[in-house]
Amino acid sequence: MSAIARRMQRIAPFYVMDLLAQARRMEADGRSIIHMEIGEPDFDTPAPVVAAGQAALATGDVHYTPARGLPALRQAIADHYRDHYATDIDPQRVVVTPGSSGALQLIMSVLINPGESVLLADPGYPCNRHFVELVDGIPVALNVGPETGYQLTAEMVEQAWREDTKAVLVASPSNPTGTLIGDEAMRKLHATVERLGGVLIVDEIYQGLVYDEVGGTALRFADNLFVINSFSKFFGMTGWRLGWLVAPDSFIDAIDRLAQNIFLSAPTLSQHAALSAFSPAVMEILEQRRQAFRARRDFLLPALRQLGFSIPVTPQGAFYLYAGCGDMCDDSQAFAQRLLHEAGVAVTPGLDFGFNQPKSHLRFAYTTDLERLQQGVERIRGFLAS
């Protein structure tokens, strides 16, 4: 057989998936496992969304849609930006995709030429750099820390800019740190990238999950950038595989043509279901869940700090805590293995999020209910004491 393409040597696996498989086997053997490793909301898809999907299935609304998505859904997404973020978006700039991963694939494919580089934060979501690799671009990871809220700044971008740099990709709120880029910092970041001749890409898939301030969107500041979003996190539709992107007008034709060729269209059933996701009834449900996530964060953050984990920046969004464990271990991956097997608590080692001190960090996801989180903290306390 022919050799596997060289780019695959640079595509790393999710290391936590091995740990998750171990946890599932332990549960099958009767062990009680508290899951704080998975970045998936524990809430079911809201009932009105499920009902809308069932109605579409019953009436046969399961045929191909336009490559950019149902016009009614694109309009609903544009209305959502207007109603919740006071931002007017032309629905023609909205493209519905198979998850936010589909959006990233489209953006990188129409924007990045082989050999062009993209600046990203480290730690960060690992798939971001892999989508750059997929189009033979060069991901350039910039170390970020608590002094910048684990986010890239305009000054960092200016200093790191290279002759081959084409774009900067940021996330707000971010995975794994849950931190935001404030309005003024986002304005400055966009202005710097634009002046240097590049394009800003903003991952906003945790947009609705912001706790201490009103969430926003980078689309308030400019039209000549890309924004990625998803129905998975805030809307609780992970398995429906639905996301969207908002692109500059000049890229829409290329994105449309590429979408036709790569996946034709996002899942039709999911699109019809998502039409109800912005309804007042569903938004009320989602607000209750947002408050539940906030309560979990407000419990777990001080609890982990009290146990000795270092979390120098309070996360403002998403559902993660990125915790330093350097005073407890030399290898967070080995630490996570011991925590799973000896205490029955599953967490994600830092190795999954880049190359910036991964052995001294763990990610805790508060995607399980408060009672289970409390049990998890007590198990960790006992583990550390032993």
Image (tube, grey):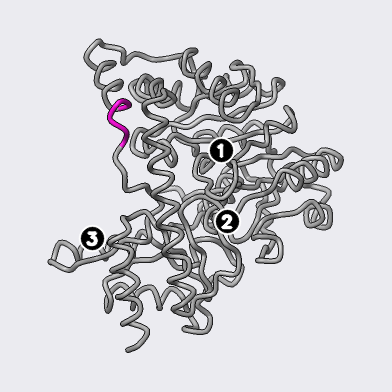
Q: Residue furthest bottom?
A: 386
Residue 30, image x, y percentages: 13, 66
Q: Are marks 2 and 3 in contact (CB under 8 Å)?
A: no
Q: Residues within 10 Å of mark 2 (few under 14, many from 20)?
A: many
Residue at figure coordinates x 50%, y 23% from the top left: 261
Quadrant that contains the C terminus: bottom left
Residue 320, image x, y percentages: 47, 57
Which one is nearer the viewer's eye here, 383 or 57?
383
Select label 2 or label 1 by which is in front: 2
Residue at figure coordinates x 55%, y 58% from the top left: 315
Report the disc number at residue 104. Answer: 1
Q: Which residue is mark 3?
A: 24
As helix, strand or loop, the secondary structure at mark 1 comes to helix
Residue at figure coordinates x 61%, y 28% from the top left: 246
In the image, residue 244 sits, relative to residue 115, either above or below, namely above
| Amino acid at dot 1 | Leu
Q: Residue furthest left?
A: 30
| Amino acid at dot 2 | Gly
As helix, strand or loop, the secondary structure at mark 2 comes to loop
**Tag 3 or tag 2, which sits nearer the N-term?**
3
In the image, residue 56 sits, relative to residue 101, either above or below, namely above
Report the disc number at residue 124. Answer: 2
Query: Magenta region: which residues?
Result: 45-49
Q: Residues within 10 Å of mark 3 (few under 14, many from 20)?
A: some
Q: Main secondary structure of the magenta part?
A: helix
Which one is nearer the viewer's eye here, 94 or 211?
211
In the image, residue 291 sits, relative to residue 55, either above or below, namely below
**Tag 3 or tag 1, which sits nearer the N-term?**
3
380 in magenta: no
* Residue 372 in the figure: left or right of residue 144: left
| Amino acid at dot 3 | Arg
